[in-house]
Image (tube, rainbow, N blue to C red):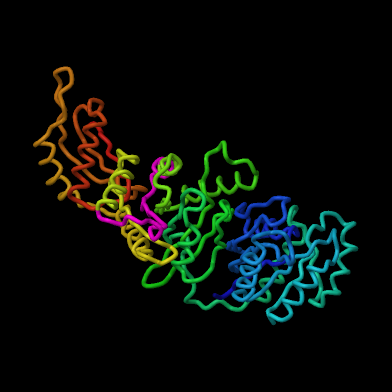
Amino acid sequence: MGQMIAIVGRPNVGKSTLFNRLTQSRTAIVDETAGTTRDRQYGRVDWNGKEFSIVDTGGWVVNSDDVFESEINKQVELAIEQADEILFVVDAMNGVTDLDDHVAEILRKSRKPVILVANKVDSNDWLYNVAEFYSLGLGAPYPVSAVSGFGTGDLLDEVVRKLPEKPADEEEQLDDIPKFAIVGRPNAGKSSIINAFIGEDRHIVTDIAGTTRDSIYTRYNKFGFDFYLVDTAGIRKKNKVQEDIEYYSVIRSIRSIEASDVCILMIDATRGIEAQDVSIFSLIQRNRKGLVVCVNKWDLVTDKSPQAIRHFEDTIRERFAPFTDFPILFTSALTKQRIYKVLETAVEVYGNRRRAVPTSQLNTVMLEAIAAYPPPANKGKYVKIKYVTMLKGAQIPTFIFFCNLPQWVKEPYRRYLENKIREHWDFSGTPINVYMREK
């Protein structure tokens, strides 16, 4: 992966704050608690016409009480391995520590270009502490304040100067790439299934609920596919969210749903469908996103008979009614059972969201269905639907029915029209809009 910059350092030196400053976003969660960042968090930076990727990492720790220590360190090592250039962040207020020396030794062995960043220079008084970091043997430190932005311009100038030239054929419109968000309750297997998709331990996986905190974007461009997979934090009930960090994680998960095209809703097969699954489904529906339901941990279920599968499907559709036209897949991230079918299905649902039905076909089918079952009369007045068309450029498939009395067409008849549309054209997984307008 070309033009990748990794931000590394010990905990609580301001790596995530610097990441947010350089990407001009609030993507990474920032908190005074050491170890807030766990997984790698990717972003893009545009400086003086040069664009490159940047990755935030968790703080490097050794011999700590943190149960995630080894996994976080593994993620840092992977980021260093992938990076073309490394920003080594240290704390100007605390000076050089044993952990800084340890990280510096690792970076020297990597033989990657390293820029030493002395963060938290929030006033001129702290500039005098910066000279101490020459002892790390990684060149001149750049004094910056990630909070105020002091010194970040000079830092970016140096980063851009050392960047390798980007091949011309790598130019692309990243914003046009579909985004598939993996959502669900804590511990439903969201990070595990993304690791299974991409074939590497990209995300930290443990049995502890709340392991994932940030919403992590991963580019998937294998087997003819090209889209973003978004790993999100588990969404719990509001009254069970006690820590500030988890609150921000949930907010970012909701934002990821809002920014996605298709949501892959993970349900734990060992626990069945619960009220929180229905709440997350409602959130997806309110935002009018495509849906693929993925029943994970199927390898742990003893009864895998067709009757059990049918009962599970019927229960899910009953709880999610009236929207029932969505695919349900039974998978195992651990054994990789049917996981690639999930990707294929998500791509199909994305295609259904963009499906266009010719007006002539639409009128031939729908006017016949309307003639067979016309709208009910209201107070002796009859509704006559004359014409139907599909709105171009809408976020989801939108159908406009022109009639003489649109106000008398109630929800049950709109649902009848929607069902007829779904019978004749494949809109599985995507909500559709049906509007009545006066001709």
Q: Is residue 343 above or below residue 396?
A: below
On the image, the x and y values in percent for residue 204 come to 57, 62
Q: Which quadrant holds residue 133?
A: bottom right
- Give the farthest residue toward the top: 379
Classify the position of the C terminus by image quarter.
top left
Say if the magenta span includes residue 161. no
Left or right, 318 with respect to 253, comes to left
Q: Which quadrant holds residue 120?
A: bottom right
Give the magenta range.
Answer: 282-306
Classify the position of the N terminus by image quarter.
bottom right
Left or right, 171 with respect to 65, comes to left
On the image, the x and y values in percent for residue 316 come to 33, 45
Say if the magenta span includes residue 284. yes
- Identify the residue at image location x=28%, y=47%: 311
On the image, the x and y values in percent for residue 427 come to 27, 51
Left or right, 412 with respect to 175, comes to left
- Give the farthest residue toward the front: 302
On the image, the x and y values in percent for residue 411 come to 26, 31
Q: Which quadrant holds residue 203?
A: bottom right
Number of labels in the image equals 0
Left or right, 344 with respect to 63, comes to left
